[in-house]
Amino acid sequence: MTTQPFKIAVMGAGAVGCYYGGMLARAGHDVTLIARPSHVEAIRERGLHMDTRGFDEFVAISASSDASAVKGAQIVLFCVKSMDTESAGAQIHPHLAPDALVMTLQNGVDNADRLRSVIHDRAVAATVVYVGCEMLGPGHLKHHGRGELTIEPSHLSEQVAQAFTDAAIPTTVSDNVRGALWVKLILNCAYNAVSAIAQLPYGQAVAGVGVKDLMRDVVDECKAVAKAEGVTLAGDVDVAISKIIETMPAQYSSTAQDLARGKPTEIDFLNGLVVRRGQAHGIRTPANQALWALVKLLETKQAVA
Ligand SMILES: NC(=O)C1=CN([C@@H]2O[C@H](COP(=O)(O)OP(=O)(O)OC[C@H]3O[C@@H](n4cnc5c(N)ncnc54)[C@H](OP(=O)(O)O)[C@@H]3O)[C@@H](O)[C@H]2O)C=CC1
Ligand SMILES: CC(C)(CO)C(=O)C(=O)O
């Protein structure tokens, strides 16, 4: 390792947390995963099973189901779903080191701000995540591809970017993370609900009759709302959208995975957020509204069943 090993904790070690935590542990960093008890038990027993595009290994790594395990960490990868941001933030807050950096590896554009409202006295860096991964079972991670991160500037961001890049996680620091988060949001608005409603991977979902036109309407509405919010999109949204189909055609969206597992989705923070912000600016968003409503209907149907 060319950089000093960091002491790192992962709050909410599901698919994303296990992928990044595992990659960093493999590269020699001191990593503790904070996860649900079934994952902790499996990881303590046989290591984290990392079934990735590049290797298939059991990685030795510390695991705990107690939020106090963030104690002493220089970096906290905050990887819970968007609806758990405030509650998980409140759990780690009393245990965070004064100079800790908390990185929000989450979809959606408002997690870092919502987390700051809970842990206002610690550094938080919004982070944009491009990866395809899922948990196949307790302590068993499946990685489908990619893994690059974009992080907001902070007292540690440059060092973090170097250490993560050395650990085979391509990481850049950007002073327009807001614009990068919005590009990712637009991409999620275009793909996630379509894959979830049809329960199809991206390649097959996009090939459906009229789906490309629907996605185009979703993207146009999102761009109008982003403009009204004063966001300068970081890079070309259309290129980012085409890249998903090229790099992960067999991937189901995280929203599709949540519904398939009978879990609540983050749709309120994706298409739902665009609808709400659109309403605030007097911009109509019928395509996003329809996708949001349909995913909410499926969530309710599952909750009742
Ligand atoms: N999976 C992917 O390919 C991608 C995901 N993302 C984003 O990354 C973020 C994380 O997603 P993902 O990893 O897929 O989600 P997961 O549901 O796989 O992981 C989150 C984990 O955190 C656990 N958790 C929640 N609260 C706590 C707590 N207080 N203590 C301990 N564990 C807790 C959850 O348990 P439980 O379920 O029991 O609550 C779950 O196991 C999301 O915002 C997602 O949109 C971004 C890019 C790609
Ligand atoms: C990158 C992508 C689109 C991967 O599926 C994702 O963010 C998600 O599923 O939520």
Image (tube, helix red, strand yellow):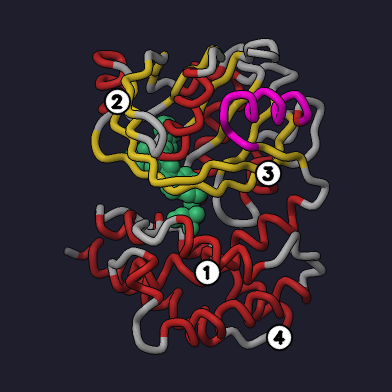
Q: Is mark 1 within 8 Å of ligand 2?
A: no
Q: Residue at x 51, y 27 (%)?
A: 10
At label 1, which amino acid type do we have?
Cys
Alpha carbons under labels 2 and 3: distance apart: 30 Å
- Disc 3 marks which amino acid? Thr
- Residue 150 - label: 3
Q: Three-letter amino acid code at disc 2?
A: Pro
Q: Is residue 236 above or below residue 86?
A: below
Is 169 colored magenta in this rendering? yes
Question: In the rendered view of the protein, which quadrant contains the N terminus?
Answer: top right
- Judge by depth and name the residue closer to the eye, 261 or 140: 140
Q: Position of residue 221 (x, y in %)?
A: 63, 81
According to the picture, the residue beneath numbered tag 4 turns out to be 282
The location of residue 45, given as percent across then percent down, is 24, 14
- 191 horizontally vs 134: left or right: right
Residue at 61%, 16% (x, y): give it.
Answer: 73
- Span shown in magenta: 158-170
Which tag, 4 or 1, sits closer to the chain's start?
A: 1
- Residue 230, image x and y in percent? 82, 69
Q: CA distance from mark 3 to mark 4?
A: 31 Å
Q: Nearer the viewer, mark 3 or mark 4?
A: 3
* Residue that numbered label 2 is attached to: 37
Res. 83 visible in picture: no
Callout 2: few (<14), some (14-19), or many (20+) C-alpha neighbours within 10 Å?
some
The 10 Å Cα crowd at callout 4, few under 14, some 14 to 19, many 20 or more, is: few
Mark in the foreground, 1 or 2: 1
- Left or right of 69? Residue 199 is left
Residue identified by numbered label 1: 189
Tell me: 233 left or right of 290: right
Q: Are marks 3 and 4 in contact (CB under 8 Å)?
A: no
Kindly identify which numbered label has been placed on residue 10: none
